[in-house]
Amino acid sequence: MDTDKLWLLFTKETMSTYKTLLPLALAESSRSLEARWCYSWSEKAYEPNDILNERTPFWTGGLDSPDFYPLQAPFRAAAAGLPAQIRIDLEAQSVISVNGFTHGKIVKVGPGVNTFLIGFGRPNYVQLFQKWESLVGGPWEDLNMTKKFAYTVTGGAWAMEPTDWRAWNNTDYSEKAWSWGWIRQDSTKESPITTGYRMSRHDELQENDAIVRYNRVRDDACEGRRIFLLENGEFGLGPESTKVGDQVVILLGSDVPLVVHKRDHTGYRKLWDLENKAKLYKSTWKLVGQAYVHDAMEYPGDLERDINDGQVKLEEYLFD
């Protein structure tokens, strides 16, 4: 059997049997034209702290030890732990059906922390966070909003006081790969760290252990991501490819909110529409990636009851 088709069937059956969308979440960086929800299991095993991966996932379940990956330490249950409602027997093989509900539409996005450029030096987080904070309505007099922003830029994994991000991002500089400090540090280092946390080189220049830990968490949360603002006033972190008009959705079977993008198959996509999706569905959804929205990381209440009472109306999302 063709390898791609094998993994397509394997992933479908995994999600259907275990009622989870974890394989879909792992495939968020897929570059395939079809079945972007399908992770290629032929590739190197997924390692969130590997420099070759775009970003550390927010997902908390089924991804090894929470002590190893800091963003997994907080409890997350955006869909209240309810099992996925998924159909895999659609006419087009590359399309699956998942039930969930919309949390909000994205109306603004901030500058992103570019994955490619990280290799040449991390951004000036002081300047970046000022831009992000301003875009979503800050700085605030309300301490709760300040905390919410501080949690957002660390993926909810940093709660040490003081909560204001300025206390931890107190050096106004960019970390440049070509600086003398970097070159000297590389030449004098005996054995580079190859396991565990991906170290930020300027961390080792800090004397404060708390700042070192903060930098690790912040880097894992922000690299490959950008801030976004929802039409309801909430804000969060999403993949750097997040755009205005994308939606944040809560899908049953997922631990975290997801950013999705609507794909119209009646336009130029007809040119390579081998499965006749334009006629069958007209439009589908593309997974952009996992998101951190502070107030949506754990469902506030009894989701199953709210669904049964009609307070939450489930929608069908067709992913390809």
Image (cartoon, rainbow, N blue to C red):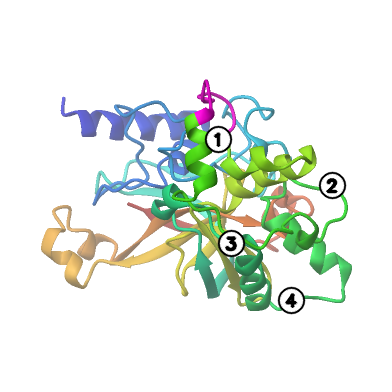
Upstream in the sequence, badge 2 or badge 1? 2
Q: Is residue 20 visible?
A: no
- Comparing marks 2 and 1, which lies closer to the viewer? 1
Q: Circle 1 sits on which residue?
A: 198
Q: Is residue 65 magenta?
A: no
Q: CA distance from mark 4 to mark 2?
A: 21 Å
Badge 4 amino acid:
Gly
Q: Could you say which disc has been placed on residue 138 in the image?
A: 4
Badge 3 amino acid:
Asn
Upstream in the sequence, badge 2 or badge 3? 3
Badge 2 amino acid:
Met
Q: Nearer the viewer, residue 284 or 46?
A: 46
Q: Circle 2 sits on which residue?
A: 160
Main secondary structure along the magenta-highlighted residues: loop
Upstream in the sequence, badge 1 or badge 4? 4
Q: Is residue 194 magenta?
A: yes
Residue 222 pos. (x, y %):
58, 54
Which range of residues does the magenta coloring cover?
188-197
Say if mark 1 contacts mark 4, CB within 8 Å.
no
Residue 92 pos. (x, y %):
24, 49
